[in-house]
Amino acid sequence: MKIHGISWAGAPTETFASTLDFFENVLGLHLARRMEKIDFAMFRLPSGQVFEIFGPKSKEHNFMKTPAIAFDVEDIEEAREELEGKGIHFVTEIETTPSGNNAWTYFVGPDGFLYELWQKEQVKPAA
């Protein structure tokens, strides 16, 4: 498995409004996207990394009980297979963006925390 770095971190919160205010106005992170109806906010850092917060109304992230980070991998299927072979438990299947170019899957580490494998968009050669 080849890990290139960390691209994303996400954190669930029961206090969405005050947590949003903290990251935007106290830490000064750039708010890139906010969806009030589902308690979701995405911050983009100067490095290109993304940090997201999810409140109680964010049903898509209800399996997250602790903050999580995403490790960028070269081949997500290969990386998942390798980790499963070492006894690592995955809590989601490999999911993709509508274009099918970005993929991710969540697993539980030995500490009981949630982590993610992420495969960035791959540039496909012209046909």
Image: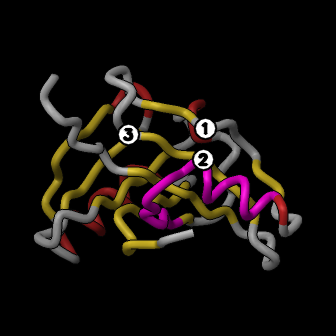
Q: Which residue is mark 3?
A: 102
Q: Residues within 10 Å of mark 3 (few under 14, many from 20)?
A: some
**For the residue marked with disc 3, what is the amino acid?**
Asn
Q: Quadrant of residue 122?
A: top left
> Residue extending furthest right?
87
**Mark 1 touching mark 2, by CB under 8 A?**
yes
Q: Please provide the residue range marked out in magenta.
A: 69-84
Q: Position of residue 4 (x, y in %)?
A: 38, 72
Q: Is residue 14 magenta?
A: no
Q: Position of residue 9 (x, y in %)?
A: 43, 64
Tell me how far mark 2 sits from mark 3, CA to CA.
Answer: 12 Å
**For the residue marked with disc 1, what is the amino acid?**
Ile
Q: Position of residue 86 (x, y in %)?
A: 84, 69
Q: Secondary structure at mark 2?
A: helix
Question: Is tag 2's residue or tag 3's residue first in the polypeptide sequence?
Answer: 2
Q: Quadrant of the C terminus?
A: top left
Q: Is residue 75 left or right of residue 36?
A: right
Tell me how far mark 1 sits from mark 2, CA to CA.
Answer: 8 Å
Tell me how far mark 1 sits from mark 3, CA to CA.
Answer: 10 Å
